[in-house]
Amino acid sequence: MIFKTLPGLLSACLLGLSAVVAADRPNIIFILCDDLAQGDLGCYGQKLIQTPSLDRLARQGTMFPQLYSGTSVCAPSRSSLMTGLHMGHCPIRANREVQPEGQKPLPEGTVTVAQVLKKAGYATACTGKWGMGMFDTSGSPLKLGFDHFYGYNCQRHAHSYFPAYLWNNDKRVELDGKTYAMDLIARDTLDWVRAQAEGPFFLYHAITLPHGKFEIDDLGLYKDKPWTELQKTYAAMVTRLDSDVGRLLDLLKELKIDDNTLVIFAGDNGASFDPKSEVGRLFDQSMGGRLRGYKRSLYEGGLRQAGIARWPGKVPAGRVCEEPWAFWDFLPTAAELAGARISPAHDGLSVVSLLKGGSAPEREAFYWELHEGASLQAVRFGSWKAVRNGPSKPVELYDLGKDAAESTNVAASHPDLVARAVELMKTLRTDSPDWPLVDQKPGKKKAAKKNKN
């Protein structure tokens, strides 16, 4: 069901949820990495970068090549994941910086998946990067359902892998500027999971790897490769991401909670590199041109993630499922698993059945927008995908069933489908003074490029 609402009305409905005792409530871990390309992982075809832990996760679970992010940049994509709202209703629809530290916060009354699960009796933690409001704002993770936070709150701060400080809850922890932050974040994550072994718990592990700036403490097996320093660093960052995930998976097995823990892995948006760049080209991040676009576009390469889900005995092992689903489905999915009743005041649909090998829920459409420079819109209905790169731009139409690379615009031969797409782009969004649909204005393009979160 698609429900159109403002965040204030949403909160009134969702805060009325009640927990239902469930016989077998799993622990839930959502691992969200930063700017990973689908083609960066071995299980998705990567040949040069080693990702043994994630490849193992894929073998033991199900790959979802059509898991869609909320949109194609950090803050709004994460906001969609947390709120169960797509970009037509989400209170954050672009990266917006706040000085001296932080981003535009989720507004008062926002309800997150962490609040839903906490009310249902789950311990909750966010480790890594938040980027949806500093601690003195309505967007603080500690005000939105998380018992514990460790890492970077601000996306700009998260650009440094050797930072001067991190945050432990809302307390600033001073560092020497020489410590690799991923060491500390990984250790805190493992310590928290170890302390929650009795469960149930929800961990939102928002790893900053492999987002720029591109820094690594050890090039490891790539040190002597005949590549540029950037290429070697990027590969090492992806492999470091893989090793951190591996340590977490090993801990679940050590604690004997592996079989009762659902692990979902994804990136927050597409790769940060143009496929023709030194990184995109060497590592074939577009997978031979199979996906068009990357970060900040609404083509498939900017939206599709390297989706993997594993829950031994529940999620089929060794399966590749091409059914599409999206970040905004996570909230109702987690609620069903936790036995929590929620009102339908969200855009997502539970995909519990899909995760377990069943069918995907029926829905009208998937919808995205982005407001960095010109307002971009995209909608998928069935196998049809429409993209409009600005409100005055023509609608492009692609048949993803035959053309996942979005190489052939068939809008001219399907005026009826273009009309339907235009109508969906209108009805699937709520107007907001914060996010008006605008064309690129003179002088704005350069400013938009500076915001590299």
Image: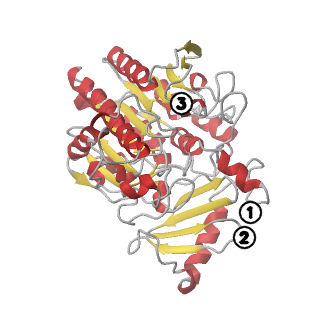
Which residue is nearer to you in this view: 429 or 247?
247
Badge nearest the viewer, 3 or 1: 3
Rendered location of residue 86, percent (x, y): 57, 50
Rendered-image quadrant of the C terminus: top right
How far apart marks 1 and 2 lie (CA) works out to 7 Å
Which residue is nearer to you in this view: 391 or 381?
391
Q: Which label was assigned to residue 160?
A: 3
User: Residue at (31%, 17%) from the top-left corner?
Assistant: 198
Q: Is residue 178 visible?
A: yes
Above or below — where is 191 with respect to 84?
above
Mark 3: give few (<14), some (14-19) or many (20+) Cα within 10 Å: some
Q: Which residue is mark 2?
A: 392
Of pointers 3 and 1, the one earlier in the residue sequence: 3
Indicate the secondary structure of the residue bearing disc 3. loop
Mark 1: give few (<14), some (14-19) or many (20+) Cα within 10 Å: some
Q: Which label was assigned to residue 439?
A: 1
The amino acid sitting under disc 2 is Ser
Rendered location of residue 143, percent (x, y): 60, 23
Rendered location of residue 62, percent (x, y): 27, 48
Mark 2 and mark 1 in contact (Cβ < 8 Å)?
A: yes
Rendered location of residue 7, percent (x, y): 67, 41
User: Residue at (65%, 50%) from the top-left corner?
Assistant: 449
User: Residue at (21%, 21%) from the top-left corner?
Assistant: 254
Q: Is residue 453 left or right of residue 383?
A: right
How far apart marks 2 and 3 lie (CA) works out to 38 Å
Of pointers 1 and 2, the one earlier in the residue sequence: 2
